[in-house]
């Protein structure tokens, strides 16, 4: 828990909203077109402490608690999903996982560098033939003296093309293990992945690791604990970020459809006066309010350290990614032909929403997890 006042945290969230409105939203389409988040923007975010928003101040962070970090993520996610991905991957998947499982030496070494933006981090789990079945990673690790030799390929790695450090999940004699791999190590190669449906600016890459020598001190926790501790922790943290990202995207889609419907005329009337348009807006507002409530509940439980937070986070991620897709689809419909053109943001929001139903565990996987929970929790003899 944090002892930082709510007033301070509210101020940070408000400032993030203003920053996003000025520095991110007007350029989101340009980021997609250029297939890159500008380094200048990343540096500005680092200078404000945004890359370490939830890190303790001792590591250069802002100290936001889970609830305010979620609200902060929503503000950035409303403006640009690719920019929000920096928080999901660099800050949550890697940074928060290091906070929880890294040694004192690892935290002191890497977290300040991540906070300042001197080192950008990514999370290397998925592979060309391994996605949902995360335990089956083929990237290998073999211990030789005081180092490990890593070989394998990771795919669909957000920030992979610009990252300085990679949290890589491997497989060895003792099971899955996690290592911090540095870009400058011999045998590391990254290749950007082009032709993506969305997230084109998120520097998604293929990472090839060929006989990479990693010192033993770069092993997180111990050999064989990479899945039980690191992967499960990281994916939970990532799902919390994605849940709030879904709310941000849904809210942005509502803002777009409401603004457009109040300006667009058909049959001599503003289209917001038509009942079927109002129906779509009414449903969108209701779903978004419900999704935000789920996220806030998950955040409060995380703040307390309640184990129930994991399931509530899963429920929130499933629900918000689902409604983001539904609301973005309706936003395109309200825009009509204009909704199919990149001149209007809803075209991008529609594509980005689909990705949320896939990353950090597909909606189908979330359904199975939630169903298993329901079958245990609500069984009456």
Image (cartoon, rainbow, N blue to C red):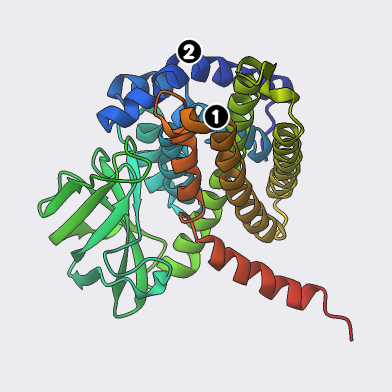
Which of the pair 273/231 is nearer the observer?
273
Residue at the farthest bottom position: 381
Residue 73 placement, left or right of 208: right
Q: In x, y percent, where is residue 265?
A: 62, 17
Q: In terms of secondary structure, where does tag 2 sit?
A: helix
Q: In x, y percent, where is residue 72?
A: 59, 30
Quadrant showing the N terminus: top right
Residue that label 1 marks = 335
Q: Earlier in the sequence, mark 2 or mark 1?
A: 2
Q: In x, y percent, where is residue 148?
A: 21, 65
Residue at the farthest right position: 381
Residue at (61, 28) in percent of width and height: 257
Check residue 22 in the rendering and tell me which mark sits there, or answer none.
2
Quadrant showing the C terminus: bottom right
Residue at (29, 24) in percent of width and height: 39
Q: In x, y percent, where is residue 141?
A: 24, 69
Number of numbered discs visible in the structure rendering: 2
Q: In terms of secondary structure, where does tag 1 sit?
A: helix
Residue at (54, 67) in percent of width and height: 365
Q: Quadrant of residue 272?
A: top right
Which of the pair 209/101 is nearer the observer?
209
Disc 2 from disc 1: Cα separation: 25 Å
Which of the pair 291/49 is nearer the observer?
291
């Amino acid at each position: 828990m944090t002892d930082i006042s709510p007033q301070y945290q509210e101020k940070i969230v408000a400032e993030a909203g203003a920053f996003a409105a000025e520095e991110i939203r007007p350029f989101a389409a340009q980021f997609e077109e250029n297939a890159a988040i500008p380094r200048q923007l990343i540096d500005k975010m680092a200078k404000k402490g945004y890359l370490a928003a939830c890190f303790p101040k001792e590591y250069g962070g802002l100290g936001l608690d889970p609830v305010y970090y979620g609200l902060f993520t929503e503000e950035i996610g409303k403006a640009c999903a690719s920019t929000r991905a920096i928080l999901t991957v660099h800050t949550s998947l890697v940074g928060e996982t290091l906070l929880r499982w890294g040694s004192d030496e690892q935290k002191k070494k890497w977290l300040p560098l991540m906070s300042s933006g001197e080192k950008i981090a990514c999370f290397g789990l998925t592979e060309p033939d391994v996605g949902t079945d995360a335990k089956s990673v083929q990237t290998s690790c073999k211990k030789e003296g005081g180092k490990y030799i890593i070989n394998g390929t990771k795919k669909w790695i957000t920030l992979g093309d610009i990252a300085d450090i990679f949290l890589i999940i491997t497989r060895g004699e003792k099971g899955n293990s996690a290592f911090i791999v540095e870009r400058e190590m011999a045998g590391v190669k990254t290749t950007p992945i082009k032709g993506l449906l969305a997230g084109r600016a998120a520097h998604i890459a293929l990472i090839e690791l060929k006989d990479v020598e990693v010192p033993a001190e770069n092993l997180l926790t111990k050999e064989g604990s990479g899945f039980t501790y690191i992967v499960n922790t990281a994916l939970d943290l990532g799902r919390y970020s994605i849940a709030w990202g879904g709310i941000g995207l849904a809210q942005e889609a509502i803002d777009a459809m409401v603004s457009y419907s109040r300006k667009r005329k058909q049959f001599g009337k503003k289209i917001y006066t038509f009942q079927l348009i109002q129906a779509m807006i009414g449903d969108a507002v209701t779903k978004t309010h419900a999704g935000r409530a789920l996220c806030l509940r998950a955040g409060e439980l995380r703040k307390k350290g309640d184990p129930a937070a994991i399931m509530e986070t899963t429920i929130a991620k499933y629900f918000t990614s689902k409604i983001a897709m539904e609301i973005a689809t309706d936003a395109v419909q309200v825009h009509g032909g204009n909704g199919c053109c990149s001149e209007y943001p809803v075209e991008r929001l529609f594509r980005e929403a689909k990705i949320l139903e896939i990353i950090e565990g597909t909606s189908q996987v979330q359904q199975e997890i939630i169903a298993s929970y329901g079958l245990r929790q609500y069984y009456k003899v």
